[in-house]
Image: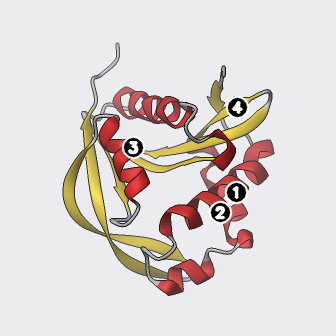
Amino acid sequence: MAYTIRAATGDDVAAIAGIWHAGWHDGHAGHVPAELTAIRTPDAFPPRAAARVPRTTVATLDGRVAGFVTVTGAEVEQVFVAAAHRGGGVAALLLAEAERQVAASGHTTAYLVVAPGNARARRFYERQGWADDGPVDYAAEAGDATIVTECRRYVKACEATP
């Protein structure tokens, strides 16, 4: 399949939010505090997706969003792929684009945070050359509050691009 990688637009918010909601629950249910899972409703994702559009890249197939990645500084903040597109290489394309963006912004090391119990994601990152850098407390947005969750920090060296 030939995916197209491009910057997200406001028109992508609904698709991003849907992929994010489904993927978040696939990877996090049972691995994060129940109060965090409870507030991650379908309605919680569109405003979060809209706020991140300027930092989000999507992969499309036949004009439809198949997955997305969000980069903030050196952090690969979100990587999610629609279930129908998993296993087709789109996640690797998005992660490589995120690494390129991190390097282009002058950082020499990219990092991301993953729930310890999300074994599928951890195996994927390791296959892509990322290394588990140890535990980290992650402050998750929870409406007006934050919920701190113990996660794993993964890192990868990024080569600067001319």
Relative image position of residue 98 (x, y in whole percent): 45, 35
C-alpha gap between disc 1 and disc 4: 15 Å
**Residue type, mark 3 in image:** Phe
- The quadrant of the picture occupied by the C terminus is top left
Disc 2 secondary structure class: helix
Disc number for residue 124: 3
Which quarter of the figure has residue 115? bottom left
Observer-nearest of 132 and 74: 132
Single out the mark in the foreground, 3 or 2: 3
Disc 4 secondary structure class: strand
Query: Counting other residues with Cα less than 10 Å from the Cα at mark 2, is it few (<14), some (14-19), or many (20 or more)?
Result: many
In this rendering, would 99 be left or right of 36? left
Number of numbered discs: 4
C-alpha gap between disc 4 and disc 3: 20 Å
Where is mark 1, residue-wise? 17
Q: Are marks 1 and 2 in contact (CB under 8 Å)?
A: yes
In this rendering, would 6 be left or right of 101? right
C-alpha gap between disc 4 and disc 2: 18 Å
Disc 3 secondary structure class: helix
Q: Residue at x 66, y 20 (%)?
A: 2
Observer-nearest of 34 and 9: 34
**Residue type, mark 1 in image:** Ala
Relative image position of residue 81 (x, y in whole percent): 60, 45
Say whether disc 4 or disc 3 marks the residue closer to the N-terminus: 4
Q: Are marks 4 and 3 in contact (CB under 8 Å)?
A: no
**Residue type, mark 4 in image:** Thr
